[in-house]
Amino acid sequence: MTERQVKLFRNGRNQVVRIPREFELPGRAAVMRKEGERLIIEPAAPRSLLALLDSWDDLGEDERFPEIDDPPPGPVDL
């Protein structure tokens, strides 16, 4: 299901929409923007390096960094 009618209500001066379980976003923050008449809500990007690293898949045993040709630097006159 990609579409569902939801209820809007007020909480003080804020308008609130209840997000159904099947549309829940991960994390505790989201980014909201308006494009014409559309309101778009997306998960916020992780704010810490640890959260970013934690979101990456682990490298498997067969997925290693490639060998890099790294010759020693030549002489430099100062």
Image (cartoon, rainbow, N blue to C red):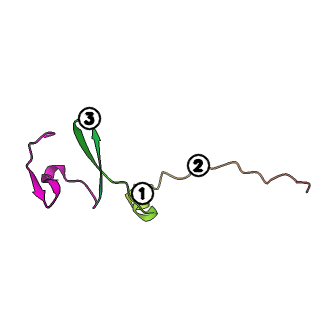
Magenta stretch encompasses residue 32: no
Q: Where is residue 37 in the image (x, y as percent from the top left)?
A: 22, 36
Residue nearest the observer in this picture, 16 or 50:
16
**In the visual, does 23 lie left or right of 29?**
left
The residue range painted magenta reads: 1-28
Q: Position of residue 1 (x, y in %)?
A: 13, 40
**In the visual, does 19 lie left or right of 59?**
left
Callout 1: helix, strand or loop?
Answer: loop
Q: Which amino acid does label 2 sit on?
A: Pro
Q: Mark 1 points at which residue?
A: 58
**In the visual, does 43 lie left or right of 15?**
right
Q: Residue furthest right?
A: 77
Q: Which label's residue is closer to the chain start, 2 or 3?
A: 3
Q: Report, in whole angstroms, how far the alpha carbon at label 3 lies from the one at label 1.
A: 40 Å
Q: Which label's residue is closer to the chain start, 3 or 1?
A: 3
Residue at x 28%, y 60% (from the top left corner): 27
Q: Which amino acid does label 1 sit on?
A: Asp
Q: Report, in whole angstroms, how far the alpha carbon at label 1 lies from the one at label 2.
A: 16 Å
Residue at x 80%, y 53% (from the top left corner): 73
Residue nearest the observer in this picture, 76 or 78:
78
- Numbered circles on residues, count: 3
Up-down relation of residue 5 to residue 31 (above or below) = above
**In the visual, does 78 lie left or right of 64?**
right
Q: Name the residue under label 3.
A: 36
Residue at x 46%, y 56% (from the top left corner): 61
Q: What residue type is labelled 3?
A: Gly
Q: Residue furthest front?
A: 13
